[in-house]
Amino acid sequence: MRNRYKQPNPRCRSMILSTKLHIPQTRRDDLVERAAITELLNKGLKSKLTSVTAPGGYGKTTALSQWLQQSDIPAVWISLGPQDNDLIEFWSYTIAAVNSKNPKFAETITPYLPSLKSGAFESFISVMICELESFSDELVMVWDDYHTIDLALIHASVAYFLGFLPAHIHLYITSRAEMPFPTARLQTTGQMVKITIQELRFQLSEGIRYFQDCMGLSLSGEKIAVLVDRTEGWISGLYLAAISLQRSGNYSEFIRAFSGEHRNISDYLFQEVFSLQPNEIQSFLLETSIVDRINGPLCEAITGQVNCQELLEMLEQHNLFIVSLDDQRKWYRYHHLFSEFLRRLFRQRCAGQSKELHVKAAHWLEEHGFLEEAVEQLFVDGHHHEASTLIEKHLQNLHAKRGVLYRWLRGLPEDCFTGKPGIQFLYVKVMVETNELELAQARLRLMEDKLSHPEWTPYAGTVHFLSAAVSFYRRDFRQANEYFEVFDRHTPGGSYIQMIEANSYSMYFDTLLSFFHNLHDAERFFYKWIKVWEERDNYPYVGFFYNTYSLLLYEWNRLEEAEVYAERVLRSACMQPYALILLSASINAARICQAKGDSAKAFEWLEGVKPKIDSVDKRMFMRRIEAEKANLSLANGSFDEGWLETCGIKHTDTIPPGPIKEYLILASVLMERREIDEALQLLEQLYRLADKADRTWDKVKVTILQSMALYRKGDMTIAVMKLEAALQLAEPGKYIRSFVDEGVKMAELLREYIRQKQINPSRKSASILYARKLLLLMSDHGNETASSGALITKQELKILRMIDMGLSNKQIAEQLQITAETVKSHLKSIYRKLHVNNREQALKQGKEFRWL
């Protein structure tokens, strides 16, 4: 049966809203020159961080935008909101903002964004810092309303970012709360300027200038003092008071009645202003307050009025708490406090209209491509069913929004999933990616219970496929097999969900072999399903299994067989669109060529796959390829130092759970540069990660490199102990290439291990025979020369092969032009090394080592 897999659209990206990158404009005739604030903001140009923290309405945004308008320094601005609580979203806007000043910035940095999917940010930040360092001029970066960000990962990434921020880049953050990341070090080193409510509140002299000069009110200093005192210099309170006074015929009476807390003052004064507006304007304000950003067409969709653009311009003209978000005066937002007031009033007066208006806003936003804002609009007042319908409708476009999508899905009541299998399947996949396997399994069990219902019958295959995947990741391979069998009966042509993200750089592990403690179990599992699926037409999913099986065969040094499976992928037309499958196959092919001694062909494989990678994450795929090329160079003794400059990782990174291959290559590079302590520091962190995840494959790789690092350092005793630990982990699975690929130094260490264990045998030791087999294989591959009691020599190998051909001792002597006695001596040496007593046993061992 042919299955037409729908190809993913690699170009789908969240829309960057340019209005969020616009520096808010201020009317200079309404502003008071504030020398003290200006001095503090200027001081920030000599620091890394300037924080401007105060409650709403103290003029944080106004102070910064006014200062920037009067300054010549290049600046970028990001207006943050709750929808930016996503690591990729947050840094995407930062990239877009900086790109407005340096158009090549996004081209360089954006390809590294997918690395944030796993929550790891160090590599991404490192690349960003490198690019910022190349800027020739100073740059001010503003994150406005940072208090709307509550994701701990973002706070951690910002702290890391600040730790390495170049001296000519200055970060300014406005927030209603203190910075939620450590700032003590910045403060003690003079790298931080703090502007708080104490500096922002108006002093009497500023209040007098504001009322008399800016607002044109002929108030006495005494009356202004009362207003400043009662508002405690709260700028929004003074502004509201000024607007009310402009409409009041009795200044003294108004001031006498002016009292209360800030919230009460704002509500009172907003009500004063609001009540003076015509009914048409009141309705417009209330109804349009439900969205964060407004323009004429959106307001028309919500209110049903046709003159909305004119109304917006009129509100701006009359200073009715509206802020322009672009130079064309198309997009606006209400002052935050006024927006809060309007929304409270909306809930009181218009509760019956709420659902209808939010749905209207969501429909317009959806139609114009603002999908995230549309979904958020439906979540505002708990319109969960509408939100779930919208999410399901646009799953393909929203799929990459992992952080936001997961928040939405977790916020949906259970009944919103009814009749929406697409959302449920995606929810399970997100749970798997976040390692919430028990939750994923529980949800799948609920779906399995529904499979008896006719409406669920078409989805039976997908449910069982996801159940197989969850069972696999939980290492219940028996159950995974059972689920795959049911899946295959229901969906012999495959399911679209098999290939979700197969064209994006979403590697949560280096290889599926990581989940097996014993490689023989892996062989049985993958070989079984390869045989089931290999003859099917247009079945790209089998490519993942081909690659895994090829890597397993490579590890066992069965190079010809490994090459067959790698080439199957590379020749398959249906697998070409999937970058993940192509990348793995090309890396396998390159490793095999290198092991067979054809390093030129190995490099050709890696270079040849580059133009075939068609993905928005192409830069990440290129980085992985360059890491493999660096590894090949190491094996050939010609390492290119330039890789360290571009790899985007460091030994000091905090490494998240997930793939570690690039870090293993980095550790090898550090050893080659004789930075042994740095390599050991990195390897220790990698081992803790591998041990916590209980991944034998990774532990073998890391422990081998630890033994190599200690050997290079000269700590022979500890190096031998580490090698023994690696051998004990590896022997049940019969690992070979992980040791052999380390070359001459591994052979030397193996020889030392064998020597020590012969002198002082231990029951707990890895078998000496296993170590000998590895050493003999290394000799056969030309990685080592002969050494007494440890290796079979090339001459001995020739003799063993002649015995396999049926030659007698005399015939062998004639062929090699040596005496028959010399042949006998060689045979005794071979028997001793192989722990055998006769020709038949020696040949059996030789075949086991694949020499014959």
Image (spheres, rainbow, N blue to C red):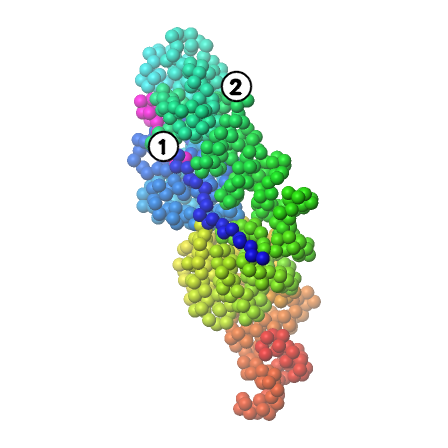
Q: What is the three-letter code of the residue carrying label 1?
A: Asp
* For discs 2 and 1, the disc positioned in front in the rendered view: 2
Label 2 close to label 1 by CB (< 8 Å) = no
Q: Quadrant of the C terminus?
A: bottom right
Pinpoint residue 812: horizontal percent, then vertical percent. Answer: 58, 89
* Observer-nearest of 779 and 846: 846
Crowd class of label 2 (few under 14; some 14 to 19; many from 20; radius 10 Å):
few
Identify the element where label 1 is drawn: loop
In the rendered image, which quarter is residue 728 located in? bottom right
> Is residue 483 something that shows in the picture?
yes
For image coordinates 60% across by 74% down, the residue present is 849
* Observer-nearest of 308 and 685: 308
Q: Which residue is mark 1?
A: 326
> Is residue 713 something that shows in the picture?
no
Pinpoint residue 82: horizontal percent, then vertical percent. Answer: 49, 34
Marks 2/1: CA distance? Answer: 31 Å
Span shown in magenta: 20-37
The circle drawn on residue 748 is none
* Magenta stretch: includes residue 119: no
Crowd class of label 1 (few under 14; some 14 to 19; many from 20; radius 10 Å):
some
Above or below: residue 198 compared with residue 737: above
For image coordinates 47% across by 36% down, the residue present is 366
Pinpoint residue 813: horizontal percent, then vertical percent. Answer: 57, 90
In the rendered image, which quarter is residue 554 located in? bottom right
Q: What is the three-letter code of the residue carrying label 2?
A: Arg
For image coordinates 32% across by 45% down, the residue present is 136
Q: Which residue is mark 2?
A: 349
Above or below: residue 824 compared with residue 96: below
